[in-house]
Image (spheres, grey):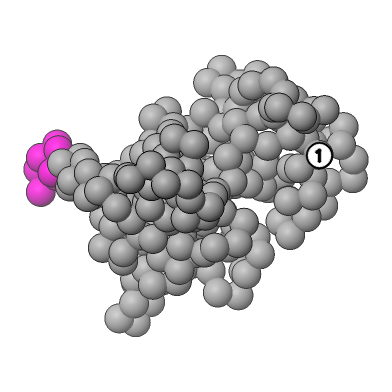
Amino acid sequence: MDLSAEEVRVLGCLIEKQATTPDHYPLSTNALTNACNQKSSREPVVAYPDRLVAETMLLLRPAGLARTVTSGRTEKHRHVLDEAFGLQPKELAVLAVMMLRGPQSAGELRTRTERYVDFQSLEEIESVLSALASRDEPLVVNIGRGSGQSQDRWRHLLGGEQITAPEHQDPMGRPMGRGEASMSVASGASLADQVADLQARLTRIEQELGL
């Protein structure tokens, strides 16, 4: 699967909010945008406009990964990854954390999925990861240990590779903080490119559907 960074972020947020704030799920476009742009538990931090999130949902629906329902005058969005891939809540939780925060070790996943589900042990996390990696179409892969880490890291295989600023520098080559670098990538010229790409993909889908 080769989802865009925006599609991965939107789906990750829908999984997260379904598990952590079920009373407010499905999400309105505004709530989903706020979830995407949340500064905590996100890597990188982004600044998506409502329109980008709405256009991303237009791509996810025909792909069978999300649905939109109308509640009064408000459209509300939900994911259907569990139906599309036959996933259980613990598998969804592990995927969501990687979708929202990048590659993770089993220990990091156990800590960061506590708000979603209850894993009894590190071995249970590793079992879920192994199951996701051994599917006919693997959803995660072991990428080995990072610098200074004692555990192997895992990343999802849904796509959405995020462009990052080399060595966290701004366009003038000046050092930037990690959050600043991520925001620059998300809200600068690359965002315009991402919007253009989404619009092109949306046009192709509309043509295929005869809309």
Position of residue 123 measured from the top left corner of the image (x, y, whole percent): 87, 32
Position of residue 79 measured from the top left corner of the image (x, y, whole percent): 48, 53
Residue identified by numbered label 1? 107
Q: Is 182 above or below relative to 107?
A: below
Position of residue 211 measured from the top left corner of the image (x, y, whole percent): 10, 48
Instruction: Give the dominant element type of the magenta stretch: helix, strand or loop.
Output: helix
Q: Is residue 160 visible?
A: no
Residue drawn at 66 percent across, 29 percent down: 154
Query: Which amino acid, mark 1?
Result: Gly
Magenta segment: 202-211
Residue drawn at 90 percent across, 40 percent down: 121
Q: Is residue 147 visible?
A: yes
Q: Is 156 above or below relative to 29?
A: above
Q: Is 30 above or below relative to 129?
A: below
Residue drawn at 48 percent across, 50 percent down: 176
Left or right: 43 as drawn, with respect to 186: right
Name the image quarter holding the N terminus: top left
